[in-house]
Amino acid sequence: MLKRYDNPPTSNREPPPMSEQRRKRYQGVLYPLTQRSRFRRSEMSDLVDEETASFVTRTINEVVRAGVLETVREDDEILYEWAAGDPVGLVNQWIDRRIHGDQVKETPEQERPRERLMRLGAASLSDADLLAILIRVGVVGESAVTGAQKLANRFHDELDRLRDAGLPELREITPAVTKASYCQILAALELGKRATEALRERPVVIHKITSTVEATQYCAEKFAYLAGDAVQEEFHIVTLDTKHKPIRSHRITIGTLDASLVHPREVFRPAIRDAASAVLLVHNHPSGDPTPSREDHSVTERLTEAGKLIGISVLDHIVVARQRCVSIRECS
């Protein structure tokens, strides 16, 4: 006889109460600790006073092994620091893995990285999710998800460094990176680089540049590769005709922007050759912070005065960085 179900089971049923109890217990230990960027072992009992000391210690040790917390020794005492990223987000990911399992196949299907990519698009995924897709499968003792999270923690905000890291270095971080997955990561990075270069070569359609907004928009698109890939400062100019339409761009120098290196002669020679009426100055900050330096302002003033002498105006000076583009004219 077939067993009758008054409430037929479904694949999308809520987690059993025991799972929710585990989740709340982990949250009770870890959430208070996320309020501190770092904390001492001796402070844990004060920050988490509703759990047994043994459970707190065991949980912290597991979080450290997962790479979510890092240990630092200071004055003969152990301090804990959260890995790069949002501590609450890292904690939630770790708790999900504890409840659903490290293996992707044990995660609810709709929450797996590939399924979320197909449903929501690649831009919605975290760095760890994208790396997990590239790693594909883990190894004994380390899943692709755990390995990807460790890589994301180590290279947070410096993903470009992955391209320069060798297989031995990545395997020191996680054994989940095999020769095959290492090749896939490098291939993905190279494709991204080539796509950026293709975008750089594509002509930027703009009728004319007559305002700071138009100048920053133009530079954000035209010089996007400087914000993402360049490891040194580069100084460029964009020559403009009498209607302030871009003629072409010229790279003037590579290296730290310095008034002694950016000589007016080198800057305005291509402008004269292009019969330009004005120029737009552009340089990047590889650090990612677009805030103009004192030297940036000095170079701008010097070139503006030189341009007046030869009848070529300096429309603006744009700093390109990972965060955003900034007009030095607006900052003056």
Image: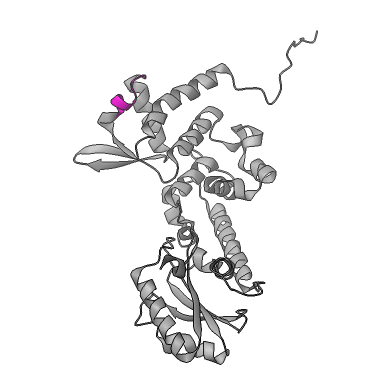
- Of 297 and 235, nearer the camera is 297
Asked whether residue 281 appears in the rendered view, the answer is no
Location of residue 42 (image quadrant): top left
- On screen, 43 above or below 327? above
Q: Position of residue 78 (x, y in %)?
A: 26, 37
Q: Residue furthest left?
A: 75
Q: Quadrant of the N terminus?
A: top right
Q: Is residue 124 left or right of residue 174?
A: right
Q: Inspect this view and state whether residue 288 appears.
A: yes
Q: Residue at x 56, y 17 (%)?
A: 17
Region of the chain picked out in magenta, as a range:
44-51
Residue, x 63% and y 70% (percent of image)?
198
Relative to 230, say whether 180 is above or below. above
Q: Nearer the viewer, residue 153 or 274?
A: 274
Query: Residue 45 location in percent, x, y?
Result: 29, 25
Q: Nearer the viewer, residue 135 or 207?
A: 207
Which residue is drawn at the image coordinates 25% and 42% (left, top)? 73
The x and y percentages for residue 124 are 60, 46
